[in-house]
Image (tube, helix red, strand yellow):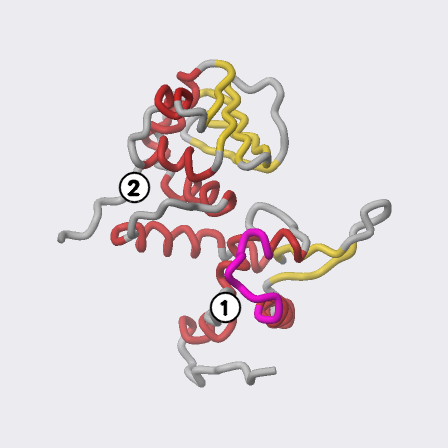
Amino acid sequence: MAARRDYFDGCGAAHALDLVGERWALLVVRELVLGPKRFTDLRTGLPHASPNVLSQRLRELEDAGVLRRRRLPPPAASAVYELTEWGQELEPVLQALGRWAARSLPESDSIKVDSFILSLRTMFLSELAADADVTLQLVLDDQPFRVRLAHGELDIERGERRDADVTVRCSPTTLAGVVYQGLSVADAEADGLLTLTGDVAALDRLIASVQLPEPLPA
């Protein structure tokens, strides 16, 4: 196993990089922000990380107290990884980094489910949703999420919501196009990329509550 690198610097930022600065480490944290995952789920979210490297990062983050491994009770009886309370405190750090980097983010034709959900939490502006009160169910690549947008707050969690004002089924890449790139819902539906059941106005309220930062000058 390669020796862990250390900056040997008393600065808090340097120590933070000692803990989560290795390649893939923060992305492992990103994958666990929305809840526990099995190793195979992490591999799905991080397909370009080799199994050996991913295993090493998980061990390092566990040793650092950022995450823990636990075994689910029967009948599942499988092991999952989850953030500790201290590890969960990294979500606003990820959001700040994401919002900062979005000013120079290159165009991409693909985004993973957890990345997109975290982007909604990152780009949400409460002042744009002060009078909103809607519920949504987003089913992205067959993964359901409950969304509540009300009184200037956005809550998103895994799971179904059968009483939602609107249910949207599509890939995260398609919904990212609708939310951030001006792709119309009607065009996405016509192309067979998205299905919508319920009140499209509820989706419009969600779209209106998120905003990308101004890009850097050319």
Q: Is residue 173 magenta?
A: no
Left or right: where does residue 20 sit relative to residue 126?
right
Residue at x 30%, y 35% (from the top left corner): 181
Q: Position of residue 27 (x, y in %)?
A: 49, 59
Amino acid type for the residue under numbered disc 1: Val
Left or right: where does residue 166 sit relative to residue 41?
left
In the depicted view, which residue is nearer to us: 218 or 100? 218
Magenta-colored span: 43-53
Left or right: where does residue 156 sit relative to residue 162?
left
In the depicted view, which residue is nearer to us: 11 or 178? 178
Q: Residue beneath label 1, please?
A: 20
Residue at x 75%, y 58% (from the top left corner): 70
Residue at x 54%, y 81% (from the top left corner): 4
Q: Position of residue 214 (x, y in %)?
A: 22, 45
Residue at x 56%, y 59% (from the top left corner): 87
Q: Position of residue 137 (x, y in %)?
A: 54, 26
Check the image and name the residue furthest to the left: 218
Q: Mark on residue 212?
A: 2
Q: Is residue 49 magenta?
A: yes
